[in-house]
Amino acid sequence: MKLLNTLSAAAVLTFSLFTLNANAALEVGDNAPNFSLKGALGGKPLTFSLQQALQKGPVVLYFFPAAFTKGCTLEAHAFAEASDDFKKLGATVVGVTAGNVDQVDEFSKLECRDKFAVAADPGAKVAGEYKTLMQMNGKTVSDRTSYVIAPDGKILMSYTDRNPDQHIQKSMDAVKQYANTHS
């Protein structure tokens, strides 16, 4: 009976791990789903097109849960501080949120400091395509996931962590690696 309980527990654990992996973010080498979303840069409305941005170079696409929350504000500040370095390497930074999409304009101006675009993902459709969804206060929103996408649409870096601390550095490292191999 003890062996049966151990085997049952192992089966449940294996199934749980499979389920978690099935919902995990897109992986390095995957094709990035193309999208176009309404958003803002410095409080001014715009439409962000991944396809158009990739024509200029790699794209740092980061998903965040909701504007004006503590972690998302810290992450926006850090991306704003690093945005000139990303630009020097030919990369475009864009933040995407499925949470409080009505605040994207103000968030782009105040917290992104007019440095990069922020796009609204109502209904979390794009976040779903990128397999970066989570529940927050009973709503489906985008989890904190960063991608670096090559101009050919392939994902060069994929990183999910609810703590915003490492997203900028991991993104910068991936962009630098790409720039070093394509210059």
Image (spheres, rainbow, N blue to C red):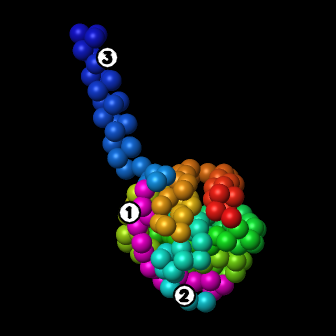
Give the image location of residue 106, x and y in percent: 62, 82
Q: Which residue is mark 2?
A: 46
Q: Amino acid at mark 1?
A: Gly
Give the residue displayed 29% in from the left and 27% down from the top: 11
Q: Position of residue 5 (x, y in %)?
A: 28, 17
Span of residues in magenta: 30-43
Q: Is residue 182 above or below residue 116?
A: above
Residue marked by disc 3: 6
Secondary element type, mark 3 = helix
Identified by mark 2, the residue type is: Leu
Q: Residue at x 58, y 83 (%)?
A: 40
Read off the residue under disc 1. Answer: 128
Q: Nearer the viewer, residue 8 or 60?
A: 60
Vertical comparison of 160 with 66: above or below: above
| Residue 50 among magenta residues | no
Label 1 close to label 2 by CB (< 8 Å): no
Residue 1 figure quarter: top left
* Amino acid type at mark 3: Thr
How dense is the environment of label 2, judged by Cα within 10 Å: few (below 14), some, or many (20 and up)? Answer: some
Query: What separation in Å lies between label 1 and label 2 (alpha carbons)?
Result: 22 Å
Judged from the image, the secondary structure of the residue bearing numbered disc 2 is strand
Contact? badges 1 and 3 (CB < 8 Å)? no
Q: Name the spot of residue 95 as percent of width and height, x first.
A: 57, 70
Q: Which comes before the other along the chain, label 1 or label 3?
A: 3
Asked if residue 95 can be seen in this view, the reply is no
Q: Position of residue 31 (x, y in %)?
A: 42, 61
